[in-house]
Amino acid sequence: MTGLMVTLVLAIMMNILWRNAIIDLITNPLTSLFTGGNEPPVKQPYYSVATAKRKRGQYEAAIAEVRKQLEKFPNNFEGVLLLAGIQAENLSDLPAAKNTLNHFCDQTGMPLKQVANALTQLADWHIKLADMESARAEFQKIIDRFPDTEPALQAELRIGHLAETEKIILAQHDRRNIVMPVGVQNIGLLDSTEFLKPSAIDPARLAAAHVAHLEAHPHDTEAREQLAMIYANDFKRLDLAMMELAQLISEPKHKPKQVARWLHLAADFQLKLGADVATVQATLENILERFPNLPVAEVAQRRLARLNSEFRGRQAATVVKFGVYEQNIGLKCGAPQRP
């Protein structure tokens, strides 16, 4: 009886001392699902106050709020970009914005993607002011600093289209009165209106324009793809079309999704222009060899499964009689390569 009483007293004392800990031990796994547990929240900057002040037109106060956060979290890219945006877009102080972003980019260890985005943003602000030389210089910084990367490739593409962009911007700022020609009178009484149809663009001239552009900007993927389509659709030249696509596919900087799309386009050209099933199959299997564990491989596998029916459908289409064209249209880059 004495032992029982002692045990009872000890149990009561333990209940008083340890009941909260035991309850927490049992209930914490359940309550953590809703409360996030006992781990302290990750410290991060908050720019909601600065954004609200910016929307109300209080730009200096917004900058002060951003700087407060940047003092606690130096080189936070979101804050740096927000600060530069207020300076350039709201205060029209592009030199200050440029200093803000250059200070960020010039520090060691900054992530590639963030530096490239900062320099691209600077280039875009210069483009809005029709300052194409300064924009070109910003894009060139990306190319020089990160050669053979995706941001460098995108910068080269942007440089290739700067002249076209400049024409569009200048046309918006310098709108001229357009004199409309007098329309055809009594059009309903005419025997034929064929002469009113706009003249088709000469494929040879269009191909030559793309070739000239690619000589100056060889990494312009859009222009090279358009040139390949002209060779295939207008000239029926599978060899030249495949040569252009092979150059796109062989670039190591392109994303798998882009490469797979070009290989599918190559297969389309081969089916349309008379290649055999084995050739088309080899082109699609190239996707499986390059990217076996990516979703593009599954898409290629499904197309391979229905390739025979697709090939029969092409054969049933109207037979196209090929014309005779100059044998070395466009870029002379050697023999066509297997994509």
Image (spheres, rainbow, N blue to C red):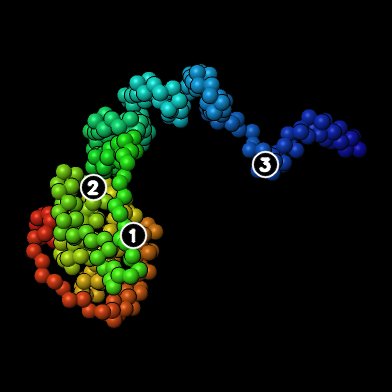
Q: Quadrant of residue 283?
A: bottom left
In this rendered view, identify the residue nearer to me: 262 or 172: 172
Judged left or right of residue 200, residue 46 is right
**First in residue order: circle 3 vs circle 1:** 3
Q: Which mark is residue 292?
A: 1
In this rendered view, identify the residue nearer to me: 74 or 224: 224
Q: Which mark is residue 172?
A: none
In this rendered view, identify the residue nearer to me: 138 or 306: 138
Residue 104 visible in this rendered orientation of the protein: no
Mark 3 lies on residue? 34
**First in residue order: circle 3 vs circle 2:** 3
Residue at 30% x, 61% y: name it: 184
Disc 1 marks which amino acid? Pro
Give the farthest residue toward the bottom. 316
Judged left or right of residue 247, residue 293 is right
Q: Secondary structure at mark 1?
A: loop
Q: Where residue 219 appears, x then y in whole percent?
A: 21, 46
Q: Secondary structure at mark 3?
A: helix
Q: Which mark is residue 220?
A: 2
Judge whether 320 appears above or below 332 on screen: below
Q: Where residue 160 appears, x then y in whole percent?
A: 23, 42
Disc 3 marks which amino acid? Phe
Q: Secondary structure at mark 2?
A: loop
Q: Quadrant of residue 90?
A: top left
